[in-house]
Amino acid sequence: MSAHGAPIPMTSRASGPLVGEAHVPGDKSISHRSLILGAMAVGETKVTGLLEGQDVLDTAKAMQAFGAQVEKIGDTWHVHGVGVGGFGEPENVIDCGNSGTGVRLIMGAMATSPIVATFTGDASLNKRPMARVTDPLALFGTRAYGRSGGRLPMTIVGAAEPLPVRYEVPVPSAQVKSAVLLAGLNAPGETVVIEREATRDHSERMLAGFGATISTEVTEEGRVITLQGRPELKPQTIVVPRDPSSAAFPVCAAIITEGSDVLVPNIGLNPTRAGLFFTLQEMGADLTFENMREEGGEPVADLRARFSPDLKGIEVPAERAASMIDEYPVLSVVASFAQGRTHMPGVKELRVKESDRIDAMATGLRAAGVHVEEGEDWWTVEGRGHGNVAGGVTVESHLDHRIAMSFLVMGFASSRPMRVDDGGPIATSFPIFETLMGTLGAEITRD
Ligand code: S3P
């Protein structure tokens, strides 16, 4: 089943060359945070370039349910915030659809207000672990009542008199870090979050932008992030940068498809997000950063990706995993077209994404003729070299947008077409994927 309706099978076939410019949509992580922080500011935040994928639209609806006014006028989203501690109690269940980021950040944002809210999601989200968020929220005094194993649907009872918290995040997760920081906004005093491995830092950057007092110190313990509670957040004008995780798909498609030359303009190269691009360069991909510049305090470039016939398999450093965690599915497709083995260690988190991404990709890659080995927190792909990947199978997308897009990209360069049983979830993060790839010269059809 698709996230929001009947399954939409899609097939991709030998295409190319892929040529032209790929304008990918706004960053999903920054889009969620723009709406949530806008709702917690006093006054009107204006957002352009917002990703209008289903995940973000579900967060917009949720912010309305907590009392913020959210509307789109022309190209601009206007969020009239209610201030830190100003959330009202929703009248109905909050449905976050497919979005782990949405549900976990919103749980944090409401956890220190004296209100009760019940959260649910689709079949994928309702399988995902929530204790990683509700455990630290309990330290503020928040209570959570979910299904066994800490799964949704779940009711959160916000703490009426929250205490500030010091918490070391046990897994590399920006969602957990962000949930604790958002909860800390309405707790008195200092909330401290410690992360051993650096994960995406959009919450820290944006909280500072909204006027919170927040600092990050790099110590032997890791990154120690300190937030002063009870600030008055000031509304902002936000231009959401384009999503490097979406850029990954046209970039990887160009690299494996003969004759291709694709420009993907305006992509943020925040070091906590850009790991895939350096990995592709190490594999020998013809990928360059053009027009390097700074925008809104972040490095930005236009990415140029060209067909790369001589890719080689590599060891992907485990320390890089957090900065490319959403990109492993499409990396495993590129690795299939390389010569030699690509080893990807330190990736246990892939097993608790929208699907178990190691299992989903390994199953589909094997069916398409690629040898894959896996353990709990690692996997290897034996590259077959360009022109030697069979394809010719239907694979399951498991309600996971990135699994669906990865296998469709594979079909552009495999000998026979690749069919995914349901491309519907692509709309959660990259609603224009089919048309955009089509304008570059790719062939994707619906049954
Ligand atoms: C995200 C954090 C990551 C990432 C997800 C978006 C965020 O999840 O996979 O797509 O916006 O904070 P984890 O926090 O589970 O690593």
Image (cartoon, rainbow, N blue to C red):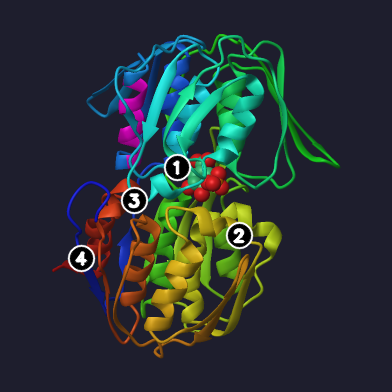
Where 179 falls versus 277 (above or below)? above
On the image, the x and y values in percent for residue 304 come to 45, 62
Give the alpha-carbon distance from disc 4 to disc 2, as whole Å. Answer: 29 Å
Sequence-wise, which precedes: disc 4 or disc 1? 4
Where 347 falls versus 202 (above or below)? below
Where 123 falls versus 258 (above or below)? above
Q: Secondary structure at mark 4?
A: loop
Residue 30 falls inside the magenta stretch? no
Predominant SS along the magenta part: helix
Give the alpha-carbon distance from disc 1 to disc 2, as whole Å. Answer: 17 Å
Disc number placed over residue 23 in the picture, else none: 3
Of tags 2 and 3, which is closer to the observer? 2
Quadrant of the image containing the C terminus: bottom left
On the image, the x and y values in percent for residue 369 come to 41, 87
* Residue shown at the point (67%, 17%) measured from the top left: 213
Give the alpha-carbon distance from disc 1 to disc 3, as whole Å. Answer: 25 Å
Q: Amino acid at mark 3?
A: His
